[in-house]
Image (cartoon, rainbow, N blue to C red):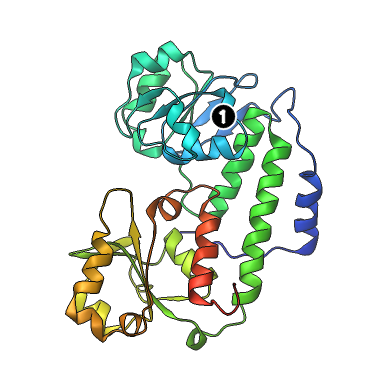
Amino acid sequence: MKLFRVIMGIAVFGFLVLTGCSPSIQKTPLSNTYTDDIGRTVQITGIPQRIISLSPSNTEMVYALGLQDRLVGVTSYDDYPLDAKNKPIVSDYSTVDLEKIVAAKPDLVLADSIQKNDTIPALEKLGITVYTMSPDNMDGILSEIKVIGQITGKTQEADKLVSNLMGRIKAVNDKTAKFTDSQKPRVLFVTWYDPIWTAGNDTMIQYLIDTAGGVNIAVDLKGYTTITLESAIQRNPQVIIVMSSMGDNHTSLNYINSNDQFKATDAVKNGQVYEIDADIFGRTTPRIVDGLETLAKLFHPELFK
């Protein structure tokens, strides 16, 4: 992962603020050729007025840019904002209904990299324009916002959103950058359990923990991977974060709290075990900055009230 470091000069930040001062819709895209997140060259003619999203993250991005009135199709997993549930469903996450997509007459389909082998080639054969969005780090999210803004004629709205997000990131980083590792809490981030799945280096979660002023105890591991119970206990996390999603009945949280071995950790002893919304941390959308702010408040409540 290209670990995103928040290095924002005042001049750059000021420029972004100024360029995002008032919303408008451009008459034509700034460019009509784009390279998407799986390396495809995508030619886009005109400003898309009928958009289909094939992932929850893409749908959130569409709403964040105020494009929801152009959204004519989503997946069955799209639940944020709540209004997304009212949009026509043309797909689950991995299997699309090509007939429904064709019937919706989209100018643009926003796909996910998971669909690159089957869905995207099938849509291309039908002459449907497809742009793939799958950013895996903060740089990618911010860049993707700007690209979609250009494609859809929402450049100023995109600049304003990026400026806002960068300002919030900077506000966190300004407070946490001064800490040495010994002043940061040791963090175990649990994405699932038995075996314990966690986030190591080269992940968005690693970036969030680091920027929020924590030390990831799994930083020596790569990617999203397992960590043995014994190793997790030995590393003695001071904060444990567990992800939960709708309908999972707090299973990961219950696993941590009911496991006698975890009682030896500082996190459990001091009541520093927290459950957070998996969608906020698992989707590469502007809401990931909400996740960053949440972690910062948990790690350093004295600084983020």
Say which of 123 and 179 sits in front.
179
> Residue 40: percent from the left, percent from the top?
48, 33
Q: Is residue 267 above or below residue 192?
A: below
| Residue at (42% x, 20% y) in the render | 124
Q: Position of residue 103 (x, y in %)?
A: 42, 11
- For the point 29% across and 28% down, the residue is 95
Find residue 256 and report its image quarter. Answer: bottom left
Residue 137 in view (yes/no): yes
Q: What is the quadrant of the N terminus in the image?
A: bottom left
Q: Nearer the viewer, residue 136 or 248?
A: 248
Q: Is residue 88 above or below residue 116?
A: above
- Within the image, what quadrant is residue 220 found in? bottom left
- Looking at the rendered structure, the kind of residue marked 1 is Gln
Locate residue 20, reporting x and y percent: 76, 44
Which residue is denoted by mark 1 in the rendering?
68
Taking the spot 67% from the left edge, 41% from the top edge, the residue there is: 158
Q: Image check: 41 left or right of 10? A: left
> Above or below — where is 174 with respect to 225?
below
Label 1 neighbourhood size at 10 Å, few (<14), some (14-19), many (20+)?
A: some
